[in-house]
Amino acid sequence: MLAGRSGDEAAYEQLLRELNQWLRAYYARRLPYCAADDARQEVLMAIHAKRHTFEPSKPFGAWVAAIARYKWVDLVRDASRYKALAPEEETAIEGHESAAISVVAINQLLGRLKPAQENVIRLVKLNGFSIARASGATGQSVELVKINIYRGMKKLAAMVS
């Protein structure tokens, strides 16, 4: 590792080859093949990215083993978060019909308001603008934006009921 950090490419390539072999054996006992291969590659990338953090006064093997163990724990933790589906189980696909209908209904209702009211309600209530930002975008005063939102929302409530 020290030679590789000093610019000796041949030594660094040899180190990566040896680490690759060690990691194959390490993960072969702990993970399924495809996960083991992913973990091995992640560790090699982590070692490459963090090689500057290795302290020569500490054992290199312990440093590598710690990285390998952390990656293994991360993979096991991630895998435990998801329930595997059996091949015969169907995956539910959420429909978007109700959301699309809601968008159409909201657009129709907003279209029945005065343009100044519709505009500020869209900006503030739907797009998350602040009152001040909506004021700047529309040219209405802050007070007028508040009034238009209040009156527009009151009219929308009356239309819905």
Image (cartoon, helix red, strand yellow):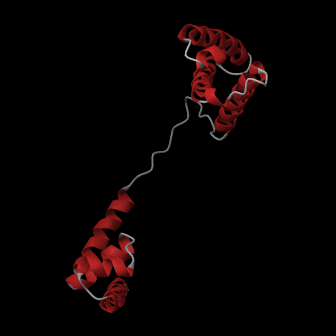
Q: Position of residue 86 (x, y in %)?
A: 59, 31
Q: Quadrant of the C terminus?
A: bottom left
- Residue 16, above or below 152: above
Which residue is outermost to the front?
6
Quadrant in which residue 10 is drawn: top right
Q: Position of residue 80 (x, y in %)?
A: 68, 37
The residue under the point 36% across, 81% down is 132
Left or right: residue 98 versus residue 69 is left
The residue under the point 60% across, 8% down is 14
The residue under the point 78% across, 24% down is 57
Q: Quadrant of the N terminus?
A: top right
- Residue 1, above or below 54: above
The residue under the point 66% across, 14% down is 19
Quadrant in which residue 56 is drawn: top right
Q: Is residue 110 visible?
A: no
Left or right: residue 70 versus residue 156 is right
Quadrant in which residue 34 is drawn: top right
Q: Position of residue 61 (x, y in %)?
A: 76, 19
Closer-to-camera residue (66/101): 66
User: Count of labels shown?
Assistant: 0
Closer-to-camera residue (2/47): 2
Q: Position of residue 116 (x, y in %)?
A: 23, 84
Q: Is residue 131 visible?
A: yes
